[in-house]
Image (cartoon, rainbow, N blue to C red):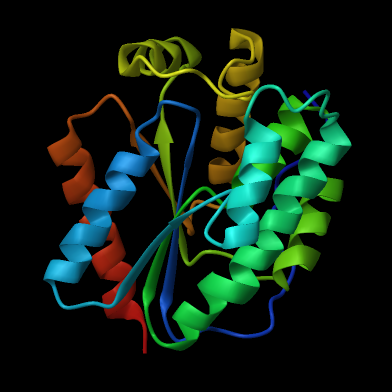
C-alpha cells in the first residue's frame, strides 16, 4: 500500500453547489452496492423524487465502451496508469453528459462507484499514489464530489464468496488476489475515517432490509437539510 495520506481525498473545491443531490455507493467487489443503489432509487421514486440511477465505469455510450476495455478479459495487458486514465476518461464523460445535467435539473443522482473507487483501486491497490489519482479525477470531473458516500464494508473473503455464489465470470479487478482486495477494503475505510461528515459506513453483512432502511434514513436527512 502507498504511504500517501488519505486525510483530505476530496478537498479540492468544485465549481459550485448543484441543485440536486449526489449519492455515491462504494465498497469492495461483492459488497452489495448495486442492490442497495437500486433499492434506494426505488424508495426515492416512490416518495416523489426525480432519480437518476447510474454506474461506473459507464453511464454514457462512451463510458460503456471504456468499461469493456478496462474490465473485460482478453484486452491484452492493461498497466496501472492506463487503467487509471481509462477510468478517469469514462468518469469525465459521465459527469459532463449525465450526472451534472441531472443535478442541475434537481434530480437525486445515485451512482454505483465514483472517484473513491479510483483512489482506492488505482491509487492504493495498484500503487499509483492517492494524490496523483485524486488530482486526475478532480480535473476530469471539474471538482464534483458526492453529497453523501455510502460505503458498504465486507472483508475480502465475504466478497469472494458472494461473487462465487453469483456464478458469474469475475472481471479483471474482481479476479485479483485476496491481498489486493484486502488493500482495497482498508483504503476505503481510511477514506471514510478521514471524512466522517460525508460518509455513511455500514456493515455489508447486515440484512438487505436493515441496510436499505438505514441508507434511506441517511439520504432523507441530507435532503431535508438542504435549502
Viewer can see residue 62: yes
Image quadrant holding the N terminus, namely top right
Q: Nearer the viewer, residue 56 or 10?
A: 56
Residue 149 location (% of width, % of height): 46, 54
Viewer can see residue 8: no
Residue occupying image coordinates x 63% and y 39%:
68
Locate residue 68 relative to residue 142 in the image: left or right.
left
Q: In this picture, is 178 found above or below 154?
A: above
Locate residue 38 relative to residue 71 in the image: left or right.
left
Residue 41 location (% of width, % of height): 26, 60
Q: In this picture, is 78 found above or below 143?
A: above
Residue occupying image coordinates x 63% and y 85%:
16
Displayed quadrant of residue 54: bottom left
Q: Nearer the viewer, residue 173 or 127?
A: 173
Residue 47 location (% of width, % of height): 13, 72
Q: In this picture, is 221 found above or below 217?
A: below
Q: How many marks?
A: 0
Q: Nearer the viewer, residue 201 or 127?
A: 127
Residue 175 location (% of width, % of height): 59, 15
Displayed quadrant of residue 90: bottom right
Residue occupying image coordinates x 63% and y 32%:
71
Locate residue 145 relative to residue 37 in the image: left or right.
right
Image quadrant holding the C terminus, namely bottom left
Amino acid at each position: 500500500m502507498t504511504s500517501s495520506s488519505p486525510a483530505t481525498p476530496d478537498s479540492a473545491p468544485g465549481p459550485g453547489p448543484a441543485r440536486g443531490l449526489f449519492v455515491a455507493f462504494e465498497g469492495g467487489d461483492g459488497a452489495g452496492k448495486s442492490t442497495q443503489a437500486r433499492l434506494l432509487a426505488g424508495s426515492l421514486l416512490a416518495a416523489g423524487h426525480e432519480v437518476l440511477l447510474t454506474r461506473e465505469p459507464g453511464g454514457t455510450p462512451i463510458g460503456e465502451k471504456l468499461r469493456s476495455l478496462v474490465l473485460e478479459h482478453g484486452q491484452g495487458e492493461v498497466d496501472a496508469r492506463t487503467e487509471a486514465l481509462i477510468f478517469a476518461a469514462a468518469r469525465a464523460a459521465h459527469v459532463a453528459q449525465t450526472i451534472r445535467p441531472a443535478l442541475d435539473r434537481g434530480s437525486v443522482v445515485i451512482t454505483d462507484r465514483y472517484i473513491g473507487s479510483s483512489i482506492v483501486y488505482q491509487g492504493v491497490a495498484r500503487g499509483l499514489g492517492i494524490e496523483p489519482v485524486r488530482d486526475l479525477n478532480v480535473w476530469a470531473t471539474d471538482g464534483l464530489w458526492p453529497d453523501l458516500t455510502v460505503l458498504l464494508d465486507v472483508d475480502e473473503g465475504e466478497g469472494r464468496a458472494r461473487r462465487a455464489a453469483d456464478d458469474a465470470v469475475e472481471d479483471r479487478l474482481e479476479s485479483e488476489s485476496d491481498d489486493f482486495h484486502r488493500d482495497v477494503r482498508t483504503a476505503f475505510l481510511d477514506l471514510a475515517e478521514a471524512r466522517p461528515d460525508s460518509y455513511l459506513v455500514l456493515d455489508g453483512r447486515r440484512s438487505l432490509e436493515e441496510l436499505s432502511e438505514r441508507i434511506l434514513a441517511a439520504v432523507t436527512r441530507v435532503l431535508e437539510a438542504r435549502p
